[in-house]
Image (cartoon, helix red, strand yellow):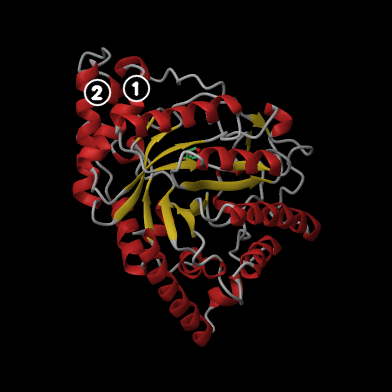
Amino acid sequence: MLKQTRFSTKLIGTALLSLAMMSGCATEQLSHNGPSLKDAYAGKFLIGATLNDGMVADPSSIKMQIVKQHFSAATMDNAMKWGPFNPQPGVYHFEAPDNFVKFTSEQGINAVGHVLFWHSQTPDWVFKDDNGNLLSRDALLKRMRERAKLMASRYGDKIKIWDVVNEAIEDDGSLRKSLYNQIIGDDFIEQAFLIAADELPADAVKLYNDYGMTRPGRVATVIKMVNDFKARGIPIDGIGVQGHWDMTSPTLDEIDQNLSALAATGLPLHITELDIDFLGRSQFFGAAGANVDLQKRIATPENNPYPDGNFPASADAALGDRYAAIFKLFLKHHKEIDRITFWGVTDGDSWLNGWPVAGRTNYPLLFNRDGSAKQALQKVIEVGLAAQ
Ligand code: GLA
C-alpha cells in the first residue's frame, strides 16, 4: 500500500514542483529552488511534517505551499488528540481534522492520525463517571472503542496510518502508571490495539509510538511487547520512533544500534516526530528525551542566545551537519524505515520554543520562521540526492 502511494505522491510532487517553477511563485523564491525533500528521498521514505489548525485553515499560505512542495506525509500536531478533539462529553471539534483530511487527500499527501490513546492531552472526563469516580475497566474500554469508531467512520477512508498508543512505557521499561493503566491494567496497550484492529480499516498501518527510543529499558520493553504481540496474534503494524533529539544526544551509534534492534522485530519503523533541539536539553535532563511532563525552565541569555529570530550561518551549518549525519543513518536503514516526519514546518511552529525552557527562541527545523530555506534543508536534500 505504502509503496503505491509513494509512487503517486512522487508524481504529484514533481508536477507541483514544475508548476511552482513555471509560475515563479513566492513560495519557490522563499523556500527552495532545487529538488524537494520528498523527491530527494523518493522510493526510500515518505517525508512528513506536522500541521497545526491555522495551517490547515489556510491552504494558500506560504507554510502550506512548503508542505505541498516538500512533504509526502502529514500529521495534525494537536487537533486529533482526545482533549482538543473532544474536550467534553458530546462536544467535538471537527473543523481542523476535517480541513486536514480535505487538504491531504486533495494533494495526494499521506495523512497520519495522531493519536488515538495517550495519557497526556486527554481530559479527565474520559476516565470518570458522572459522579467523578474512576470508570470501570469495561466502561473505559467502551469509551476507547467509541472514539476509535468515530475516527474510523469520519476519517477511515482518508487516514491510513495511525498512532494507536503513545508513550505508554517509561524510560526504565516499566509500564507508565497512567489512568489508562490504572483502570484497565497492564494489558491496556494490547486492548488498545485490539480495539484499533476491530474499528479502524484493515488497511490502516497501526503504530506504537514513543520518545526516548534509545533508552535501554524502554527499547527492551517495546521489543518484548512487539514480539509477544506477534506470537499471540495481537495486530500491530509498526513502531513509531519520535526522534525528539538534540545536537549531541543521542549519539549516532545509539541511534544506529537502536534502529537495528527495533527493526529486528520485523515491523517497519516510522520516525514520527523528528526535530533537533538546537539549543539543547541534555544539559537540563541528562539525555535527549521528550517527556512533556517535566518541569520547564525560564529563558535566560545563556539558554536563549538568539532571541530575535536570527539564526547565525555558522549555527545553521552545524544544525545541517547534524541532520545530514542522521539522514545518512536513516538511509543505511532505508529498508526498515517507511516514513520520516518532522514535528512542525518552520522554526516558529516548533514546541521547542516553549519546552523545556519557556519562551526561548529555538531553531530545530529546516525552514526559517518566514518560510525561507535553511542551510540544513539543503544539506538534508543533498544527502538524499547522493543516494538516488
Ligand atoms: C509528544 C507527542 C506529540 C507532541 C510532542 C511535542 O511527543 O507525541 O503529540 O505533543 O510531544 O509537543
Q: Quadrant of residue 318?
A: bottom right
Nearest to N terminus: mark 1 or mark 2:
2
In the image, which disc is placed on residue 263? none
Q: Nearer the viewer, residue 234 or 73?
A: 234
Q: Quadrant of residue 358?
A: top right
Instruction: Name which residue type carries label 2.
Output: Leu
Q: Nearer the viewer, residue 65 or 43?
A: 43
The crowd level at tag 2 (other Cα within 10 Å; few <14, some 14-19, many 20+) is many
311 relative to 23, above or below: above
Quick one: SS at disc 2?
helix
Quick one: SS at disc 1?
helix
Residue for point 70% across, 27% down: 286
Q: Is residue 6 left or right of residue 125?
A: right
> Given the current orientation, which residue lies at the most extreme bottom position?
22
Asked whether residue 120 is in view, the answer is: no
Cβ–Cβ below 8 Å for labels 1 and 2?
yes
Which residue position holds label 2? 140
Instruction: Name which residue type carries label 1.
Output: Tyr
Which residue position holds label 1? 180
Q: CA distance from mark 1 to mark 2?
A: 8 Å
Asked whether residue 62 is in view, the answer is: yes
The crowd level at tag 1 (other Cα within 10 Å; few <14, some 14-19, many 20+) is many
Q: Position of residue 386 (x, y in %)?
A: 66, 69
Q: Position of residue 21 (x, y in %)?
A: 53, 83
Q: Position of residue 325 (x, y in %)?
A: 70, 53
Q: Nearer the viewer, residue 374 or 271?
A: 271
Q: Is residue 141 left or right of residue 31?
A: left
Q: Position of residue 57 (x, y in %)?
A: 37, 59
Q: Is residue 363 left or right of residue 182?
A: right
